[in-house]
């Protein structure tokens, strides 16, 4: 698959000064799968903010010497980015920092606002000057404006939520408080936990909590605001229940790490269940079931269990290549460097190949070709997601139908174009079986959007040439 990842957010609140940067470092490593463009850490040392942000992977941006240069602090906020709004630029690195009359603020955001363009335009007309091309800066501006009138930072965040629409899981750090908030739809995951010595940790996924020794407590509720301060943790549920929950179902299919639990549902269990359902819906006579590493492996195991066809490793992933090594337009070359087929496993076999999704089809075409060249007799592809038919406005990098192969071809034609013997997609009607029956967003498959559709959904909508701006 070739869809791009979500961002990851991470925050720490400690009752005493600790090596907060080290917490963030390990937390971001655990969330690296959610974004590989850039990352950043801001540490709060008694009201003074110390930050480092740059393009690149966590290990490259934060070598040991850079982590050691951070002071001890009682709070920190961190972010790893894949940009679904705004180009890959140092100016767009997060967390975003703000200095204003009521003090400093640092903010990390996962998701996309569906009304970002409208809000940004109104802010610019009122005199706001933007330094980034992300909708995160729009959120920071609105919170800052509300903070000048509100009695507290948490009240400013609450008032800002009355204006924001779309997907946002936020971690906001002020000189004295760490605040996290999840949009009322709950599009993107957010959870918190606590270490044995009383340090609170907030993260996009529970795998990041465990990476720093924190025991997960629970998910942040859709619409909930949590405030961590010297008074402990306080929950504000004033925005809860205002919207019907719409957790992105693709978190279970692809975005999240399999060892995470989101809204009470194991990601790995959801993927295994997807494979079982594919075996029920699209049975086939075959000799081997194998998955595309890494997000297709659990579904392949489920397909094998339900079908009785042996499971095996048919593809090996090169674990030492970064996702950004090769540009997206060279996906065929990318496949050959990232993956290799195990000829001893697939030669002469009828192979069931499980992948998490198909977007453009270019990547999967290359993978099918690898397995065919390794001697597979037949290749039957089963996909753990329904066909992508519509753009996503909530944080997935699908802003147009133009490059979606399912919008241009029926299933039998896709199979022929990509060199498969047969193809089966996960049925939209059974998505609820992956989420524990909870409400979810499947707009990219069904076209059922929870919010108004933006007038301009392009990722680069805040980056214009002179000829596009006019006089």
Image (cartoon, rainbow, N blue to C red):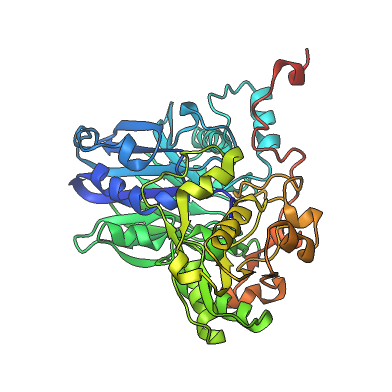
Q: Is residue 409 above or below residue 143?
A: below
Residue at (67% x, 79% y) in the render? 282
Q: Nearer the viewer, residue 293 or 241?
A: 293
Q: Is residue 261 visible?
A: no
Outermost residue on the top side: it is: 471
Q: Is residue 393 left or right of residue 316?
A: right
Q: Quadrant of residue 418?
A: bottom right
Q: Quadrant of the N terminus?
A: bottom right
Q: Quadrant of residue 330?
A: top right
Q: Nearer the viewer, residue 145 or 318?
A: 318
Q: Is residue 418 left or right of residue 145?
A: right
Q: Is residue 237 left or right of residue 278?
A: left
Q: Nearer the viewer, residue 5 or 363?
A: 363
Image coordinates of residue 256 in percent, x first then y, are: 48, 60
Count the marks.
Answer: 0
Image coordinates of residue 419 in percent, x first then y, are: 68, 60
Q: Is residue 70 visible?
A: yes
Q: Nearer the viewer, residue 174 or 385?
A: 385
Image coordinates of residue 75 in percent, x first then y, are: 29, 44
Q: Is residue 153 above or below residue 314?
A: above
Residue at (62% x, 20% y) in the render? 127
Q: Quadrant of the C terminus?
A: top right
Residue at (52% x, 49% y) in the render? 335
Image coordinates of residue 409 in percent, x first then y, are: 80, 57
């Amino acid at each position: 698959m070739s869809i791009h990842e979500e961002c990851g957010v991470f925050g720490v609140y400690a009752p005493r000064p600790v090596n907060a940067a080290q917490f963030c470092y390990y937390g971001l490593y655990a969330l690296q799968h959610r974004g590989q463009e850039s990352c950043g850490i801001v540490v709060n040392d008694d009201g003074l903010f110390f930050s480092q942000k740059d393009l690149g992977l966590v290990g490259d941006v934060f070598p040991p010497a850079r982590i050691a240069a951070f002071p001890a602090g009682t709070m920190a906020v961190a972010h790893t980015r894949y940009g679904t709004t705004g180009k890959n630029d140092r100016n767009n690195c997060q967390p975003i920092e703000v200095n204003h009359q009521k003090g400093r603020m640092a903010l990390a955001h996962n998701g996309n606002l569906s009304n970002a363009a409208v809000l940004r335009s109104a802010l610019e007309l009122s005199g706001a000057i933007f330094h980034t091309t992300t909708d995160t800066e729009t959120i920071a501006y609105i919170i800052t404006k509300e903070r000048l009138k509100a009695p507290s930072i948490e009240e400013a965040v609450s008032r800002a939520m009355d204006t924001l629409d779309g997907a946002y899981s936020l971690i906001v750090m002020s000189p004295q408080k760490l605040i996290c908030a999840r949009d009322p739809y709950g599009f993107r995951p957010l959870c918190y936990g606590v270490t044995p010595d009383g340090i609170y940790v907030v993260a996009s996924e529970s795998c990041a909590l465990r990476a720093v020794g924190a025991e997960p407590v629970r998910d942040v509720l859709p619409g909930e605001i949590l405030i961590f301060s010297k008074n402990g943790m306080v929950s504000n549920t004033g925005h809860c229940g205002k919207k019907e929950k719409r957790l992105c179902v693709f978190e279970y299919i692809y975005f999240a790490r399999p060892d995470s639990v989101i809204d009470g549902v194991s990601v790995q269990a959801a993927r295994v269940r997807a494979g079982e359902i594919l075996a029920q819906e699209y049975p086939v006579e075959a000799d081997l079931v194998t998955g595309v590493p890494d997000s297709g492996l659990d579904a392949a195991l489920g397909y094998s269990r339900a079908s009785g066809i042996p499971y095996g490793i048919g593809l090996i992933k090169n674990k030492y290549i970064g996702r950004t090594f090769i540009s997206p337009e060279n996906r065929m070359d990318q496949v050959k460097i990232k993956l290799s087929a195990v000829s001893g496993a697939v030669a002469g076999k009828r192979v069931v190949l499980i992948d998490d999704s198909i977007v453009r089809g270019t990547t999967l075409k290359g993978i099918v070709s690898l397995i065919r060249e390794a001697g597979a007799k037949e290749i039957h592809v089963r996909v753990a997601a329904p066909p992508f038919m519509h753009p996503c406005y909530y944080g997935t990098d699908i802003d147009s139908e133009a490059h979606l192969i399912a919008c241009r071809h029926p299933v039998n034609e896709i199979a022929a174009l990509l060199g498969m013997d047969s193809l089966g997609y996960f049925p939209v009607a059974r998505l609820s079986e992956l989420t524990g029956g909870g409400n979810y967003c499947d707009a990219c498959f069904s076209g059922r959007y929870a919010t108004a559709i933006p007038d301009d959904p392009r990722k680069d909508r805040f980056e214009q040439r002179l000829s596009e701006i006019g006089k």
